[in-house]
Amino acid sequence: MSCALGFDVGSKLIGVAVGNRITASARGLAAIAMRNDIPDWPALDALRAQWQPDTLVVGLPLTLDGAEQAASRRARRFAAQIHARYATEVALVDERHSSQEAARRFAGARAAGLKRRRDGATIDAEAAAVILERWLAAPDSSSIRTSATTP
């Protein structure tokens, strides 16, 4: 199977998306709770068991000039945790502007009548889909580092 899961790691929620290498497309799945930098592992375990991905893609939030920040360290820590937990390849992908792209897509879907305001909670999952689509489009060039041996 050529399936990948993408993650947009925040301080309170982790957006999760699933993508397919054949079509190079992704779609948002869920927003998983994150409390005190600890993800809802049972929820993540269930998604992993359901989709059985061969790659996990984590968005790496960088500043506009490409520098790391506190959120970058959180994403790297999460990448290391899922690599250790699932023994699966992890790719870190520059996620700059992914939230804006997700918001733009959501606004477009609302304007087309496909989404409602109450669906706004799915924006974290949509951001994960944007991140995953970037990786699917160019898995070698968009990855910052393919490994989870990061601190």
Image (spheres, rainbow, N blue to C red):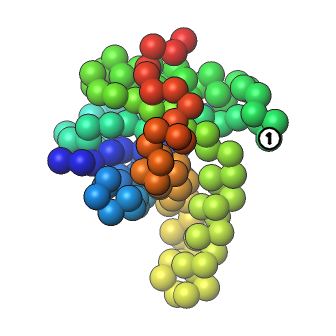
Considering every residue shown, the one lying at the far bottom of the view is 112
Position of 43 with respect to 120 (left or right) is left
- The answer to whether any part of residue 125 appears in the image is no
Circle 1 is placed at which residue position?
Answer: 64
Q: Residue at x 33, y 63 (%)?
A: 23
Locate residue 19, reporting x and y percent: 35, 54
| Along the line of sight, the residue nearer the viewer: 139 or 68 | 139
Task: Identify whether 135 is placed above or below 61.
Answer: below
Locate residue 52, reporting x and y percent: 21, 41
| Along the line of sight, the residue nearer the viewer: 50 or 53 | 53
Task: Identify whether 128 is placed above or below 40.
Answer: below
Task: Identify whether 99 is placed above or below 49.
Answer: below
Task: Identify whether 105 is placed above or below 122.
Answer: below
Locate residue 72, reporting x and y percent: 64, 28
Q: Residue at x 33, y 45 (%)?
A: 4
Q: Residue at x 44, y 20 (%)?
A: 148
Report the label total: 1
